[in-house]
Amino acid sequence: MARRRRKNGPSLASIFTQYFLDHPDWLNAGKNEIVIKQFTIDHPSLEVDKRVKQAMYNVKSRMNKGEVGLKRRKQSKMAARQLVAAAGRSDRPLAPLAMLEEQIDDCMILAKQIGRERMDHVLHALHSARNAVVVMLES
């Protein structure tokens, strides 16, 4: 659904943002009658309908989150940047081989935990595979 903008004057969100900035105690108030009353005084030509109330609720929620919401958004952006950076590093031809070597090492550790005698043939195969990967890394 497309946004409806008011042709004259500020948006509903900016109106309610200003109310909550001017009266921070309204953010913690359980009921919103004060805010609605102020809105009807300031804007008698506008009807207080579902759209107006939803704008007020959205602004109140956003402002109550405050720094916490900002911190979460920054963390999610940072995590996305780290994923992109990690993907960029894997473009080098040696990076996948190094990752493979580490994974083979992990498999060898797990096989040793299961039991050397039981997993002897698996350990030999993993050791040969790791040696082959190391040779590829060196060349």
Image (cartoon, rainbow, N blue to C red):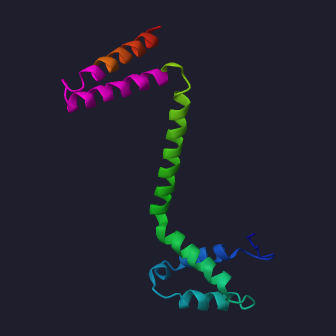
Residue 42 higher or lower than 63, as above or below? below
Answer with left or right where residue 41 lies relative to residue 68.
right
Q: Position of residue 57 (x, y in %)?
A: 56, 78
Q: Which image quarter: residue 135?
A: top left
Nearer the observer, 135 or 108: 108
Residue drawn where x is 76% and y is 76% of the image: 9
Nearer the observer, 72 or 135: 135
Residue 120, magenta (yes or no): yes
Give the residue furthest to the top. 139
Q: Which image quarter: residue 100?
A: top left
Residue 66, magenta (yes or no): no
Residue 7 higher or lower than 44, as above or below? above
Residue drawn where x is 64% and y is 87% of the image: 39
Q: Position of residue 11 (x, y in %)?
A: 70, 74
Q: Quadrant of the N terminus?
A: bottom right
Residue drawn where x is 76% and y is 74% of the image: 4
**What predominant SS class does the magenta segment belong to?**
helix
Answer with left or right where residue 113 lies relative to residue 108.
left
Residue drawn where x is 56% and y is 31% of the image: 88
Q: Position of residue 128 (x, y in %)?
A: 35, 14
Answer with left or right where residue 87 lies relative to residue 117.
right
Q: Provide the residue span drawn in magenta.
A: 95-123
Q: Position of residue 33 (x, y in %)?
A: 54, 91
Q: What is the total number of numbered labels drawn onto the structure image?
A: 0
